[in-house]
Every structure is written in structure tokens, then in C-alpha cells.
């Protein structure tokens, strides 16, 4: 069996902002369509965790991953590796490396190409090794999970705010079981000022569009031609073409001149979810893989501080991958676009982005979590691992040494419950607790197979929640205090599951 992309996963946040809502408030800007919006409790780390979970759900599993790379232009931390948080939340092994690829959007393509190279057979350097094979001098056969994530914002009323979106994608690249192999790649680099943001700034600056277009178009054509030559194919052999970049004008100009037929161009997702920045090429590739057939050629071209292009060829294993994803209930990109909720208010969006500061509740400010305490409870806090008594089978949440049922001591087996669904036993609504999206919904969940736990509910409205509703778990940022992010798991409505009962909430 050949190596390459063995599994993939995309994550688009639940919330959408209608662009017309911007113009309705500001009197200008706005437009048609919607943009995907990360919730108040999401950042690029949590987005990456959700994409990674979906890639692992239909792949060889967390135990097979030897390296993890996280690429984002908007990391949750500086001077601390955010990839280790993703590593812990996914339950990856201690021997698995975790590395950040931060900086510009171009790093996202670099992280995927690095993962594909590491999954190769490890051909030693030599004149007979093709330059675009991605295997020159690579370590032999390492299973690598490449996660790309971006959360984009802009000044109120700006084109950046209107046209951007948030999302993440993950690709599990393995030496065996690949459904799409890298057969060619090309690149073109040049130093010029197009888009920039210095440390400490939250909004990007953009130079005049015509200047960027004049430079991007020849770079893109050079990279694309080099990738096709490296793969030994022509434009007519391409079955699916993905062209992305934050410079919309250059992307449009490049697309017209690629020489591929219009029918092979991947659907433009920007009208429905916005331009996802560093994650856009990955999400678009996920969408193509979900629709592709065996023995097809996929070409990806990304414009970001230069141009990168690579060519993939699918094989028969793609059929089994589609079946495995369906059995695991992994939502496709199209499913997530259709499931998005587009009634988020513009005021809510500005609040979540930190551009509108509302009166906080009259409660003490949150305190930062202590490093020793967090480390001691890492398996519970990040991997959401409960414990089951091996003597009587009783499940404990959080984990404990002593069984509450049979009183046995140290007869416990860890069980990861992050992917186990549950049912709402009861819930309460708290109007006083601190939240950027009040009120806070507290729920008590009965997990399938045993175990009851109280946690916070997200991606839900209080008047739409009922006792008996089905929920799943999601990794979120609970709060940030003194520069420390407090991550934990919350419940959210299970996709495709309606209310199974009716109940009333308790008000606080």
C-alpha cells in the first residue's frame, strides 16, 4: 500500500454572520452571503483540535501518529507551543512530537508538504531523486498529522472583516493506506510587501491591490507549471483544481489563466463561509477529497508571499475512506456549510472579537489556572479521560482512585469520553456567571455507557434546549486570565439529532 494522505478532517464553526448585518449597523460595507465565525470560546487551537478529531476518527487512530504540526498565523500563545495543547486534547502518545508552524499563511502549505514528505519512503539524497518527490532525505515512513487553522478578523466595516472566515483542516499523512499521493510540486518565491501585521497588532495591513496582482500572477503560473511538469502531466489531465489566496483579485486573475477547464475548478466557498486564510486551501482540499473518485488528479495552488502548487493522485483506497467516514458520522464540508446558523448579531460578533467591550457581571474576575494543578490532571482536562472500575464497571467523571460504587481502591482503567455522545438529564441557565455570550447554560449529561457529568453548553440557545436532547463534546477555551488560556470540554447539540423530550430550565 502506498503512502500519502490517509485521512482528512475539516471544521467550520457553527455560527455565521450575514454580511448584510454589517451594512445595516454601519450604513456601509456588508454585501451578500455569510462568513463563518468562531464562537466566543473558540480560537485557532480549539478549531485545530476539532479538525484533528475528524481526521483521526476515520484514520488509523491517535496511537499511530508520530508527529503533529500545527500551522496558524494567529497562535493562541507566543513563547509556548500551541501544538502541545492540540496533542493533549487529541490524546496522542507521549513519544509523538508536537510543533508549531506559525507566521504567514504560506506556512500552512509548508506544514502539509512537510507531513507528506515525512510519510514518504525515505529516499536518500541523490541525483536520481525527483526534485518534487517530497522524499529527498526524508525520514522513512513517519505518520504525521498536519493541522492548519485560522481565525481572521479586521476593523469594523473593513473588507477584511466582511470577506474573511474562520476554520481549520487536518490531514493524516501515513506511509501506508494513503488515498491520495503527492506526485508533483512547484514553488515560486519573491520578497514583496502585500499583507503584513507586526507583533502586537490584531488587524492586517494590505498594500494597493494592483501591485500585489502584478507580482502574484507570474509567480502562480510559474509554480503551477513546475508542479505539472514535476508530475509529468498537462493542464488537461487535471480533474480538480483548487486555487486560493487572501489576495482575491490575484486569485481571480490567476484562475482565468491556468489553462484548466472551468468544470474542474473547485467550488468557491468564500460566499458561504468567507476566505479562511491559512485554512482555506486545506478546507477546499477536504471538500474535493469528499467528492473525488479513484485515479483522479487534484492540483492545489496557493498564493501567499509567493506561490506553492502541488499535485495529488487518488487511488482505490479513497472508496474505503469515503465509506469509513460515513460509518463514523463525520460531517462533510458541504454538510457543515448547510448546518451553519446565520442569525448571529453584528454586536455579538464584535463582542466575541474583542472590539466591543460590554459591562461584565458583578462577579470576581477569573483566575489563571495553576500550572502544577493542570499538569496533574492533564488526562482529564485535555483528553477528557474518565476512569472505569475494573471490579464493578462503574464509570467515574472526573477520574478517581476509589470507586464510589464498590469502594475498590486503584482498580481503575482510563476511558476517553471525548467522542462518546450523551443525553441532557437536566440543565440550568445562569444570567450572572461571566461569559462573552450570556447567559451561561449548565447541563448535566448522562453519557452513553454510564457516567454523569455537569459542564457548560455551547453553540445553543437557552430557549431551544430540552431535557433528553442528544449532545456531543467539544474542546473550547473557557476563559483567559493573566495571559493563560483555560481549556476544557463543553457539550454542544449533537449534529442531526433533534430534541427527544421536553423540560424546563432552572433560572439563576
Image (cartoon, rainbow, N blue to C red):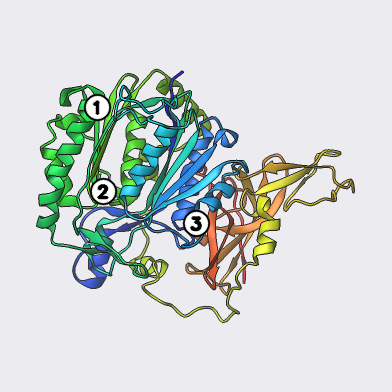
- Residue 166: give x, y in percent of width and height: 36, 53
- Residue 415: give x, y in percent of width and height: 70, 42
- Residue 12: give x, y in percent of width and height: 40, 48
The foreground one among 131 and 13 is 131
Q: Secondary structure at mark 3?
A: loop
- Residue 488 visible in the current orientation: yes
Q: Which residue is mark 3?
A: 460
Between discs 2 and 3, the one toward the N terminus: 2
Q: Residue at x 9, y 56 (%)?
A: 210
Residue 349 position by quadrant = bottom left
Between discs 3 and 1, the one toward the N terminus: 1
Q: Which residue is mark 1?
A: 230
The foreground one among 37 and 81 is 81
Which of the two discs, 1 and 2, sits closer to the camera? 1
Q: Is residue 116 left or right of residue 195?
A: right
Circles 1 and 2 in contact, beta carbons < 8 Å: no
Q: Residue at x 49, y 27 (%)?
A: 324
Between discs 1 and 2, the one toward the N terminus: 1
Q: Which residue is mark 2?
A: 270
**Dot 1 alpha-carbon crowd within 10 angstroms: few under 14, some 14 to 19, many 20 or more:** some
Q: Residue at x 46, y 49 (%)?
A: 48
Q: Is residue 434 above or below residue 488?
A: below
- Residue 445 visible in the current orientation: no
Q: Residue furthest front?
A: 126
**Dot 3 alpha-carbon crowd within 10 angstroms: few under 14, some 14 to 19, many 20 or more:** few
Which of the two discs, 3 and 1, sits closer to the camera? 1
Residue 9 position by quadrant = top left
Amino acid at each position: 500500500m502506498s503512502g500519502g494522505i490517509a485521512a482528512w478532517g475539516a471544521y467550520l464553526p457553527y455560527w455565521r454572520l450575514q454580511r448584510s448585518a454589517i451594512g445595516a449597523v454601519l450604513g456601509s460595507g456588508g454585501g451578500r452571503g455569510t462568513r463563518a465565525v468562531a464562537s466566543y470560546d473558540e480560537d485557532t487551537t480549539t478549531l485545530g483540535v476539532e479538525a484533528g478529531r475528524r481526521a483521526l476518527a476515520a484514520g488509523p487512530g491517535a496511537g499511530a501518529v508520530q508527529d503533529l504540526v500545527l500551522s496558524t498565523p494567529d497562535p493562541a500563545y507566543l513563547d509556548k507551543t500551541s501544538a502541545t495543547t492540540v496533542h493533549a486534547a487529541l490524546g496522542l502518545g507521549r513519544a509523538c512530537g508536537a510543533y508549531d508552524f506559525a507566521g504567514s499563511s504560506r506556512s500552512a502549505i509548508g506544514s502539509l508538504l512537510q507531513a507528506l514528505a515525512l510519510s514518504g519512503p525515505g529516499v536518500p539524497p541523490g541525483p536520481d531523486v525527483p526534485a518534487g518527490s517530497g522524499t529527498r532525505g526524508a525520514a522513512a515512513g513517519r505518520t504525521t498529522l498536519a493541522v492548519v487553522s485560522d481565525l481572521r478578523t479586521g476593523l469594523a466595516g473593513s473588507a477584511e472583516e466582511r470577506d474573511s472566515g474562520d476554520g481549520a483542516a487536518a490531514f493524516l499523512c501515513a506511509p501506508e493506506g494513503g488515498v491520495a499521493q503527492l506526485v508533483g510540486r512547484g514553488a515560486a518565491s519573491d520578497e514583496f510587501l502585500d499583507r503584513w501585521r507586526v507583533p502586537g497588532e490584531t488587524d492586517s495591513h494590505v498594500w494597493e491591490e494592483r501591485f500585489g496582482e502584478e507580482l502574484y500572477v507570474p509567480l502562480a503560473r510559474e509554480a503551477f507549471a513546475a508542479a505539472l511538469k514535476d508530475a509529468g502531466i498537462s493542464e488537461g489531465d487535471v480533474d480538480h483544481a483548487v486555487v486560493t489566496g487572501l489576495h482575491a483579485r490575484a486569485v481571480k486573475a490567476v484562475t482565468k489563466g491556468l489553462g484548466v477547464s472551468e468544470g474542474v475548478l473547485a467550488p468557491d466557498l468564500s460566499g458561504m463561509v468567507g476566505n479562511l486564510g491559512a485554512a482555506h486551501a486545506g478546507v477546499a482540499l477536504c471538500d474535493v477529497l469528499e467528492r473525488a473518485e479513484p485515479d483522479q488528479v487534484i492540483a492545489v495552488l496557493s498564493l501567499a508571499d509567493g506561490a506553492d502548487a502541488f499535485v495529488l493522485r487518488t487511488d482505490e483506497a479513497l472508496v474505503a475512506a469515503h465509506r469509513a467516514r460515513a460509518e463514523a458520522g463525520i460531517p462533510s464540508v458541504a454538510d457543515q456549510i448547510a448546518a451553519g446558523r446565520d442569525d448571529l448579531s453584528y454586536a455579538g460578533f464584535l463582542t466575541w472579537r474583542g472590539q466591543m467591550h460590554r459591562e461584565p457581571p458583578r462577579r470576581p474576575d477569573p483566575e489563571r489556572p495553576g500550572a502544577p494543578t493542570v499538569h496533574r490532571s492533564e488526562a482529564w482536562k485535555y483528553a477528557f479521560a474518565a476512569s472505569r472500575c475494573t471490579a464493578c464497571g462503574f464509570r467515574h467523571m472526573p477520574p478517581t482512585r476509589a470507586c464510589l460504587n464498590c469502594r475498590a481502591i486503584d482498580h481503575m482503567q482510563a476511558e476517553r469520553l471525548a467522542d462518546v455522545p450523551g443525553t441532557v438529564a437536566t440543565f440550568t441557565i445562569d444570567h450572572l456567571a461571566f461569559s462573552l455570550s450570556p447567559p451561561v447554560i449548565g447541563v448535566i449529561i448522562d453519557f452513553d455507557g454510564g457516567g454523569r457529568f455537569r459542564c457548560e453548553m455551547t453553540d445553543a440557545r437557552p430557549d431551544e434546549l430540552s431535557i433528553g436532547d442528544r449532545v456531543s463534546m467539544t474542546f473550547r477555551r473557557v476563559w483567559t486570565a493573566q495571559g493563560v488560556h483555560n481549556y476544557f470540554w463543553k457539550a454542544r447539540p449533537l449534529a442531526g439529532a433533534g430534541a427527544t423530550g421536553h423540560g424546563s430550565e432552572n433560572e439563576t
